[in-house]
Amino acid sequence: MIDTKKLFQKIVEGVKNSGVGSKIKEMRPLSYNQVNTYVTCPSKYRFSYLQTAVADTADETTVKGAQLVFYNVLTRTLKDAYKSGTIAPLAQIISIFERYWVPSDFRDPSEEIKYREEGKKILENYFQLNKDEKGKVAQTVSWKDKDKKFPALDQKVLVQFGDVKMSERINRIMVLPDGSYESVIYRMSRPWGTDLRPALFLAAAKKLFPFRRHKITYYYLRENKKVVCDIKKDITEKLNIMVKSVATGIVKGEFSPDKGSWCAICNFRSSCSMWAGFKIERGRFRLSYSKMNVFLNCPRQYRFIYVDKVRTKPHSFFSIGTSIHEAFESFYDYDGIMKRPRIGYLLRLLKASWKSDGYIEDGVNEQEYYKKAEKMIKNYYKTFVEKNKFRKAYKIEEYFELPIGKKGLMTGFIDRLDENEDGSYEIMDYKTEPKWPDEKIMDDHKLQLTLYWWACKEGKLTPVPPSALSLFMLEFDKKVTFFPNITGSDLKKDDIDINKMIDENVALVDKTVEEIEKCLALFKDGGHHPDESFPPKENVWCSHCDFRFDCPLFATEKKL
Ligand code: SF4
Ligand code: SF4
């Protein structure tokens, strides 16, 4: 059924939006970083590029100065090293590096020395790998004087993406012996998540050298490794959609804050309305529920992921969970003209949010998983949507930070917060696990729900603390609801003795932080083998562990 009020609102919006297209065409070129900032948080974009807000200072979590200086010096050095068209001798490269080196922006002299030595090592390794490189730096003509040519180093290019103008910079463009072109982009490390930027680099390279064959290469300086980017058509399409929606948001003046874990590295937090009244306690140990569980299950695995920062492999069970969560996220943010969105809409959302990562690696059939996800979604719709009045969620994927105990800062996202018709609030958490939780796992879930309840109360995420805490066990088409009991007396079967559970959370976080800090201290003192400081601990998840073949407990498997 159509909601006539919403239909009217949409018509008004449509009238207001006419003229957006021509404003987009008049916009100044956007950089990829600007687009990315807007996608992360539109308000941060406004602070960074449109307002002269004073950035926060002296917060170790927000200062990225040292790394930025380091990257800039390395790329400037490599730019000069290729000025003749091929790589300069190593001694010359090192002398350029020394000339560009900036001793400021480091926390102390020992940090400066560490970076400086690392810089030299990176350049030495780079030189050894590239000294016999075939090909020459391509030459571009000056826009002022067509007879003048310049090496294509640190090239700034303007590209038209649909109606949006974009600016991009390519570190180095080479002409290879077979006549094709290679654009090299220096990076310190591999990007997280889906990286659409190679499509922009390709468009920029083609604009500079049309009618040529091109490839885009990322050079990871720390790893001293070159990787050719696989730019599929859908990457270009996704970038197009992203750029267009960002440009539309900017010209329409849409700059609402979007709170998330990225706030921890935002320099405008003290000016941000989302954190008004929130006391930032510096120096607390940031811990999410999953990070804490990784440590409790196995300190060695924790070290790999959070200390060595080794990237975990994609897995089918993560992909199906993320896809379903994302589909629900959009579903409960429905802003269309129907009183209740249809099942077809939810299924289309599932299709759009489907992640294909990890199925091949896990040796399972992706199609079967997709069918399974469809079944869960259809059952959910039938049981929980069809028979009820549809209400847009009060909040979705709500991020929180909660100081706990002596040293901990718990961070996390709450899947969904609902406001009920009677004005009460309910926490909703989706679970896609294939087994019904045993008592121990259910107790863990209760502990986690308590944490969410506490975060709502302390962070004022809801006007009054939630009165129900629910889990959707999607595989079983069941909703399990617990009720917070504040007095701890007259406890019913589904009650949670909330204050007792809060105390349990505090004790657990304090103990875990203390243990992690001990492990880190041992690890940093350098006198211990890493396995001694973060010892392996066999557990039920070992069979799924990405680090099993590097684990001393399973060393014999490796030899087989
Ligand atoms: S603190 Fe978070 S919500 Fe606020 S502007 Fe920064 S990123 Fe956005
Ligand atoms: S295989 Fe098991 S014990 Fe070894 S690192 Fe992984 S989780 Fe830890």
Image (cartoon, grey):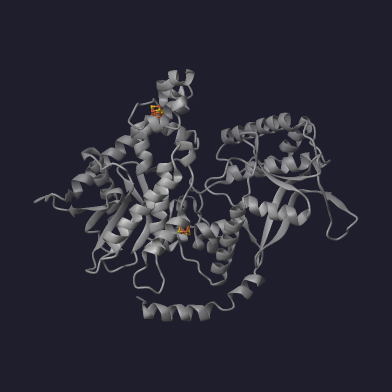
User: Looking at the image, is 13 positioned above or below residue 547?
Assistant: below
Q: Residue at left 42%, top 56%?
A: 350
Q: Quadrant of residue 467?
A: bottom left
Q: Position of residue 312 (x, y in %)?
A: 47, 37
- As rendered, which of 491 and 69 lies closer to the eye? 491
Q: Position of residue 443 (x, y in %)?
A: 23, 42
- As rendered, which of 349 and 286 lies closer to the eye? 349
- Left or right: residue 133 compared with residue 481: right
Query: How many numbered dots are placed on residues in this image?
Result: 0
User: Looking at the image, is 368 positioned above or below residue 424?
Assistant: above
Q: Residue at left 54%, top 77%?
A: 17
Evaluate whether residue 218 shows in this view: yes
Q: Image quadrant for the N terminus?
A: bottom left
User: Looking at the image, is 223 positioned above or below residue 500?
Assistant: above
- As rendered, which of 479 and 457 lies closer to the eye? 479
Q: Quadrant of residue 34?
A: bottom right
Q: Position of residue 510 (x, y in %)?
A: 30, 38
